[in-house]
Amino acid sequence: MSRPGFVLEVDERTPALLVHEGEGFGLRKLPLGSRVVYPPESLPGLRDVDAQIHRAVHHPLGRPPLPELLFAGMKLTIVFDDLSIPLPPMRTPDIRSRIIEQVLELAAAAGVDDVELIAANSLHRRMTPAELRRTVGERVYRSFFPHHLRNHDAEDRANLLEVGTTPHGEVVEINRRAAESDLIVYVNVTLTAMSGGAKSVSVGLGSYRSLKHHHNVHTLRHSRSFNDPPNSAMHHSYDRMAGVLDAHVKIFQIETTVNNDTFPSQLGFLNKREWEWSLRDQAAYLAVKRANELAPAGRRRQLWQRTVAPYGVTSVTAGAPAEVHEVTMRHVLRQQLTEVDGPADVGIFGLPYICPYNVNSIMNPILVMSLGLGYFFNLYRGQPIVRPGGVAIYYHPVRNEFHPVHHPSYIDFFEEVLAETTDPVAIEAKYEEQFATDPWYVHLYRNSYAYHGVHPLYMWYWGAHALEHLGEVIFVGGDRRTTARMGFRSASTLDDALEMAGDRVGRSPSITYLHAPPLTMADVR
């Protein structure tokens, strides 16, 4: 029986607490009286994952068993989440490969010979052959790549199909092969409440024409809690689009969840509460920290990007997307949810080295903003951990570094757009169409490994709710010029940051530190 999450109040006996700082980490003392929100202890993984997959597809929710949906002569499309999830990547074999193999075995037994596999990369960069191989496994890769295993292309007009429009005028346009299939089997890993469910097909296989209806400033500002669908305008849009899809294509969703075993054994201290560190954990902390600081920047990044998580799979659920996701969410919340008594004046967040959009890449400043204000800020249910007008303090160096292949439009966005304005509304009105339709960006997205041209704008929009809610954003250790370009401030230490925040929150503010990763979702009452 794993222990639930809890909130620690810092007193004289509290040790220095671990804080992630990009590709580094350190122990930091917090002011007395600060609250620290810890996630529940890692749940045990399933003992027999393959048996649970078999059980899920033969006893689904809201759908006939998968073998009954398969028949000779049908067109079957298997779709799977791309490399943006889970984070860090899971140790092989990836749960997606184990599910896909069982689905393919059932399809072969039914005489299905028209099968395509598509990575649901939406407007993300294409996965490389090596990344596809790692996700689907060697046997599937050898059997299907390159002709029947591929990335979705959101700019391939000939292979997109408009399947309908919602009552709100939202265009639903997805991958043509999937839309014309007799059955889509979607294989998902739900790491947070922001993924899975109705979002999977409409976003993962969508086009810019579809995504712009919910990836916009208005919708994101009105999504008061991404983890509480009744309060999320974005989830309402996903649901409307799912309703249109249901009328045109049958989807058999297979969703999985994982536990909080985020770091491998050599970094096991990162998974633990600090006062429970053994002498071995303390020695490992000192050794890893010193080696990390001595390593050249390129080598340090390479080592972190090669880190894989020994996740245990905690659930496999199959069937109709809405019914499946309801069960999936219960498993996610059981692993991540911690009750917190009200918001604080100041929220503290340590940002790690990875986010959904820099796997095998570089965490550029726009991605730091999106990770901090778009993802970590929104790891709550009910209300944010920071009160309206309060201050968010993030730990991250925010270096002016970009991956020229993966993030070309990000460079232009940072250098040109943010030099003029940081206002999401103004950016959307003046620049979105330009970045979304630029022929060079489209070419790089389709033929290289670049994120879609509009992607940096969407990342900026993800922070729109936090920007509207907060009175100040400060980065401890952040590069001053880089943070200033984005409209934020930087401080050398936490004490300096709290001094800077004094005008907003006074000299004795209440403070809450969201201790993550492993991921914690604050249920703020």
Image (spheres, rainbow, N blue to C red):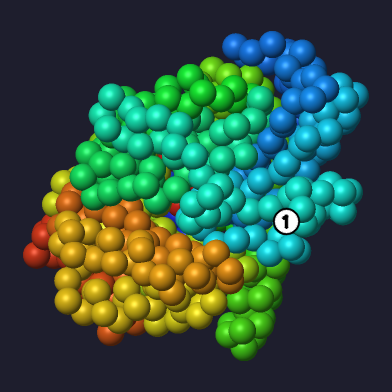
Residue 467 seen anywhere in this rendered image of the structure: yes
| Residue drawn at the location 18% of the way across and 59% of the way down | 429
Residues packed near mark 1 inside 10 Å, few (<14), some (14 to 19) or many (20 plus):
many
Kindly indicate the quadrant of the structure image that contains residue 223. Answer: top left
On screen, 488 above or below 151?
Answer: below
> Which residue type carries mark 1?
Leu
Q: How many marks?
A: 1
| Residue drawn at the location 48% of the way across and 27% of the way down | 245
Q: Nearer the viewer, residue 465 or 126?
A: 126
Please identify the residue farthest to the front as the structure is shown: 158
Judge from the rendering whether residue 17 lies leftward or rightward of residue 61; answer left or right: left
Residue 237 in the image: x percent, y percent? 34, 32
Q: Quadrant of the N terminus?
A: top right
Residue 212 in the image: x percent, y percent? 33, 47
Judge from the rendering whether residue 235 lies leftward or rightward of residue 38; answer left or right: left
Kindly indicate the quadrant of the structure image that contains residue 426. Answer: bottom left
Residue 488 in the image: x percent, y percent? 23, 71
Residue 511 seen anywhere in this rendered image of the structure: no
Q: Nearer the viewer, residue 360 or 375?
A: 360
Residue 239 in the image: x percent, y percent? 40, 27
Judge from the rendering whether residue 154 lies leftward or rightward of residue 418; answer left or right: right
Q: Quadrant of the C terminus?
A: top left
| Residue drawn at the location 58% of the way across and 85% of the way down | 297
Judge from the rendering whether residue 334 lies leftward or rightward of residue 162; answer left or right: right
On screen, 480 above or below 60?
Answer: below
Q: Nearer the viewer, residue 481 or 41?
A: 481
* Location of mark 1 (residue): 132
| Residue drawn at the location 19% of the way across and 49% of the way down | 469
For label 1, the SS is helix
On screen, 191 above or below 104?
Answer: below
Kindly indicate the quadrant of the structure image that contains residue 128. Answer: bottom right
